[in-house]
Image (spheres, coloured by chain):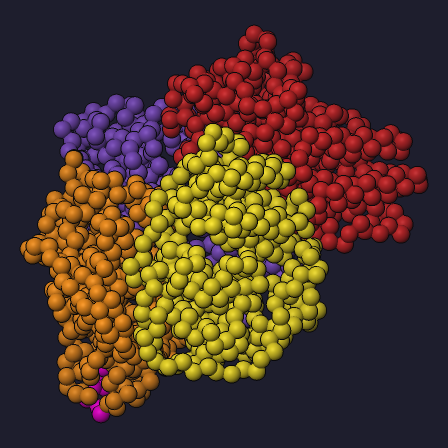
Chain colours: A red, B purple, C orange, D yellow
Amino acid sequence: MDSKKLSDNFRETRELTTQICKPLAIEDYVVQPVVDVSPPKWHLGHTTWFFEEFVLKQHLENYQLFHQDFAFVFNSYYESVGKKVMRTNRGNLSRPSVDKVYDYRKYVNLHMQKLFETSIEDELCKIIEIGIHHEKQHQELLLTDIKYILGHNPLFPVYDNTFKELQVETQKQDWIDIKEGLYEIGHNGDGFCYDNELARHQVYLENFKISNRLVTNAEYLEFIQDGGYNQVLLWHAEAWDWLQQHKISSPKYWHFVDEQWMRFSLSGLKALNLDEPLSHISYYEAFAFAQWKGMRLPTEFEWEAAQDHFDWGQAWEWTESAYLPYPRYQKAEGALGEYNGKFMVNQKVLRGQSLATSPEHSRPSYRNFFHPQLRWQFNAVRLAKS
Amino acid sequence: MDSKKLSDNFRETRELTTQICKPLAIEDYVVQPVVDVSPPKWHLGHTTWFFEEFVLKQHLENYQLFHQDFAFVFNSYYESVGKKVMRTNRGNLSRPSVDKVYDYRKYVNLHMQKLFETSIEDELCKIIEIGIHHEKQHQELLLTDIKYILGHNPLFPVYDNTFKELQVETQKQDWIDIKEGLYEIGHNGDGFCYDNELARHQVYLENFKISNRLVTNAEYLEFIQDGGYNQVLLWHAEAWDWLQQHKISSPKYWHFVDEQWMRFSLSGLKALNLDEPLSHISYYEAFAFAQWKGMRLPTEFEWEAAQDHFDWGQAWEWTESAYLPYPRYQKAEGALGEYNGKFMVNQKVLRGQSLATSPEHSRPSYRNFFHPQLRWQFNAVRLAKS
Amino acid sequence: MDSKKLSDNFRETRELTTQICKPLAIEDYVVQPVVDVSPPKWHLGHTTWFFEEFVLKQHLENYQLFHQDFAFVFNSYYESVGKKVMRTNRGNLSRPSVDKVYDYRKYVNLHMQKLFETSIEDELCKIIEIGIHHEKQHQELLLTDIKYILGHNPLFPVYDNTFKELQVETQKQDWIDIKEGLYEIGHNGDGFCYDNELARHQVYLENFKISNRLVTNAEYLEFIQDGGYNQVLLWHAEAWDWLQQHKISSPKYWHFVDEQWMRFSLSGLKALNLDEPLSHISYYEAFAFAQWKGMRLPTEFEWEAAQDHFDWGQAWEWTESAYLPYPRYQKAEGALGEYNGKFMVNQKVLRGQSLATSPEHSRPSYRNFFHPQLRWQFNAVRLAKS
Amino acid sequence: MDSKKLSDNFRETRELTTQICKPLAIEDYVVQPVVDVSPPKWHLGHTTWFFEEFVLKQHLENYQLFHQDFAFVFNSYYESVGKKVMRTNRGNLSRPSVDKVYDYRKYVNLHMQKLFETSIEDELCKIIEIGIHHEKQHQELLLTDIKYILGHNPLFPVYDNTFKELQVETQKQDWIDIKEGLYEIGHNGDGFCYDNELARHQVYLENFKISNRLVTNAEYLEFIQDGGYNQVLLWHAEAWDWLQQHKISSPKYWHFVDEQWMRFSLSGLKALNLDEPLSHISYYEAFAFAQWKGMRLPTEFEWEAAQDHFDWGQAWEWTESAYLPYPRYQKAEGALGEYNGKFMVNQKVLRGQSLATSPEHSRPSYRNFFHPQLRWQFNAVRLAKS
């Protein structure tokens, strides 16, 4: 593995994380308005802790921990490494301060630089590479968590008024025909991938059609106006309960103000653009919408088999597939093995990438996954039919 | 369709439900110790209501409802048919009395008899057939719910001291080899099946091995004694939380009393027989146990492809598969369409049948499904490996 | 103490409990629709257990427990005597059966009879007397719990169609003047009383006026129609939250059906009689109503000082007083001391008696107490002003 | 009323609030680790909003609101004035920023200064006076909330390492005899008081003894070491449940580290000083401790009758009294009337003052009140006996 390239990638990735946070006020770094959203300073600390825990502590001679309690504060879910701060408590911690967390980043960056100046074994390169990809994942979460924090504040603060979110869908609706047959699924080649993209294997698919474009806000508004949220037969049983319990009747970040649909985005609260792709909906809503259309969501295998026939990348696309291990799936050894496998129950797969996805963190075999009710990511819908 | 055969099947099924309840005290019919378990009298009423609502009310001339509020009391989850009694409230209803519910059964049976004496169209026969199969499903639930009710009473009452639960596993452990290739999956032929067993379709499977027998209590005890419940890396993240929250460290109905493992069964509290198949475990535990063995659970497709090479039937076998629609899946029309499709999220598939399964309610393509944490069914584990 | 009189009192009290349950179906004995309401069979067993635990077990030679697990099943809150069945679980226990519980009652009655034939020391007589009064309290709870069980069933079953609940208030509204001064408060004389009625002590009261009659349904309906439930300034802060959370806008058992106010009573669902005393309201509602009238509730001391100037007895009257110990209050020794003292926080005192109160279980110094939100007792309002 | 004095008092009070917050990091202003604790920036905004809402908006000509949404963000519980931010959500709001909140304070201070330059009617003076006292109350809450925020952070940050909390108790234990008789209770004279301290009235007290000093940590440690937390008969029923549910076995801020009792204070985590007064205990613990000593807590009337015989002021003293209205109590008109009266249920009275109480915010008739389980205030115990 090319150590220079790795070191550059490390530096650029670390720098980008800092860039993402630049528009924030100190106060924005601290809060956790809901359990799934972490405070930005936690992301900054946690991605740093990863390098300290799995790289420096074990591989840089004489490395001194920056602070002995930080492992406790910034560990997320690596149960095998030590006692973590309960996830719901992250937003209660005013300290370490944001400045201190940035010092922590600098300290770890500096020591990583020292490490890069030594000769690094391939095994360690791989761990660093995982650390880099781990941080890229958190870059996307940072953006969506920031959107949540600002978008749930009654003052609707702007993150960056030049920030471009979803772009208008310009293609006419068309259907791509995919022929039945055996398709190769999973990561292929030498580049980085997560363990959950392996083993590459064959899946038999029937004939199907898949849309060339994402569903738009205009299409979804029709569904709303047709009473889609009130037609029980369109919904999964647990989706229906969820609608009632949370009084949900539109996508997240939509607000009906003075007889007009508005939408909060990272550039502020603005009139809803009907020609943009629909986003911030749950799997439940994606499914109900497809039912209402008399169609369905593609499976992740259909999506992967068809993906080079259409453009993808503005938003993650819900699939009908549950997040399950591929044949011959092998969890990584030790704590790093906690990364993916332990989430393989009760989650749905999303494919593609979004506007918030970091550069070089996207590939056709990438499997994103979330619980079916979650809406704070840039989620979208592409329809399919048999 | 043969109307005489249907009528006989109806009568026998209805009679068997009554037989299952015979050993109960009146009081046992009433309670609902946990949300998933329904009071036996509710099962008696609900299965009856199905025939009243979907058959008699619409197809028997001049039919008078037995009681106008029973639809409200005995509807379960058919959201489109009317307001249901909240599931958690079922155990709060002392009335209608058990006698009244039996009167309701008789009344509906009588009118069904009248209907059978008329000429019945095929479409209606199909609905009656679904009603019969619906009742067979509830027969199994009745037995497992009764077991729950008695097994969570500090007096450990006996249901029937001659009742035979799981039989000792006598086969030696062996591995069946299944070759890679395309396999036909789903219901085949003319007999009854649910909508979720269709469409019959092809699935590509890799080479795999599957056990000729179920995991035994002895094997699971080894897992416990090796500290399996305390090794976080064996468990899904949400499984681990579930273990801590509910303080779970053994299968349901196991009790460690005076230095000995006991197990509650429908014939009472007895010493655990180590040679019996393990049962009453969650998917989470099934998965963790397989991890600990360095193996895995089969997918439902592997199971179906291999099923005529081994005996199955003492207990439902957890698979690794999520409960999802097959290609070209079509929900039945109207309220009957609420039967299966709306549960196709966040559940796992179980295959086979159990000692509590009703006669003629078993076939290789049958797809049972439950949430991964549920343990009150007769659930078991068959291991597989690649 | 007169042993013959005690024995008679015991027998009559035990018999009355049985009488109260006579109209019940077996099923009615079993359910617990809400945590505060106990299944009737639990009341039957618990009052019996009291005599077994505190009397027979310790004082009758060679007494054999009826069943070794019953102490576990029927203990309520006597934490010091052994592990109790969690209160919320009472309604999950189908066994012991109702028949068995009646056998238990007979068995204990029989052995109590044996005990009465021996010479009983005064100390023991006192404990038996407490047991009798304890059972009388449960007789009132039995009636109100039965009302709750039947009144929350969608079929609204009738307990006894000749049962007379509240009687029409015939007196004209008048105000009784009580002069300032020192008043003696607390039990006086030789008869039985609970520890919470002692020590008798002096309280200084200012001049006040107290109503000669209870508030009627008509008066409360005015409050409702004036929007009383929507005027935040009338309510305690926690009362307001309680209203919103439970969507409360009328007394318990009131139903607005076809443009008419109906009320469930033990004789069934009937049109609301406007001239009857208001009942089944919480302290919160009693307080808000008094605020709306520009008046207040009396304190328990004012009530006791004034009580021989008006009739009382149809329903318990909420007072403004918190349930606190009197000066020189002494808890009884041992487990019996758990009876009253441990509830002396966060409860309000009610004075008087109700139509459900047992004979000889009423006196001017009697202090009933409930949490301020509870409404299933026969609670009423008598107004006062300074 | 002296307008110059009022204006000085206003300015000094506002300044002191700012002083209290000086040692905080920006991040400390934002978090709300538990529902009862508010973020410091919320206190800063809320006390300012009081003057804007009740004074400037209505009484300063041409006053422009600082920001139209601040009323929504900083209203606390004044239900009649407008929609409030749900109390549990305060810690989710990163904006307005701390800087902005300080701007808000300056803006309102400036306009209050303008108002003071006009002629102010007595009625308005009274409202301003309430606003000043309101802010003094929040000063105490600010300190205790800051202690909570820092004391529940795993890094145990120091607020001010010169901060003096509780002082060692140097007096020998002695008992003050108070004679039976009628005592005047409630505020007397012209100075400011809250509505809950009126009307002044007479209470008859029996002979009693009250301790000259507060209970010390040493005495409470004896209680712990004697198993006080495990003796069910010492506790109220709901206290016992609370102990089990929250696993409580020592006062808040006590930590048993390396075989030594440590205590967090505003100057950091230090060894527990046994001679200091016990603090940060609930009413439940205060009561149980008194039971264990064979004594009791004084009532608020006993406390007030005896208070000039002992020193008080390090910490609030739990009394046995419930927080109830005095005879002839009158709520203030309108929204200001929400201040006290609406909390008069399910709370206990504390008397005295604490080290965190603001200057001029203490008097013998002052009635503080909290729910019995709350421990984050400087609460203490003074024993009494009959």
Residue in the image at 64% along x and 62% along y:
D265
Per the picture, the main secondary structure of the magenta-coloured stretch is helix
Q: Is residue C165 above or below residue D83?
A: below
Q: Nearer the viewer, residue B214 or A18?
A: A18
Quadrant of residue A198 within the rendered picture: top right
| Residue at point 57%, 75% (across, down) | D216
**What residue is shown at x 83% (from left), y 33% (from top)?**
A11
> Can you say which quadrant of the picture contains the N terminus of chain A?
top right
Which x, y percent locates residue B195? 42, 28
Give the magenta range: C111-119
* Residue B139 seen by the camera: no
In the figure, is residue D371 to the left or right of C330? right
Q: Residue furthest right?
A: A118
Q: Give the left or right position of residue C167, taking residue D307 as reference.
A: left
The residue sitting at 54% across, 13% down in the picture is A275
Q: Position of residue C348 (x, y in %)?
A: 31, 62
Q: Is residue D188 above or below residue A328?
A: below
Residue closer to the observer: D159 or C138: D159
Residue A247 placement (x, y as % from top left): 42, 33
Residue C112 forms part of the magenta stretch: yes
Q: How many marks?
A: 0
The answer to which of D290 and A193 lies nearer the viewer is D290
User: Residue A226: x and y, percent?
Assistant: 39, 18
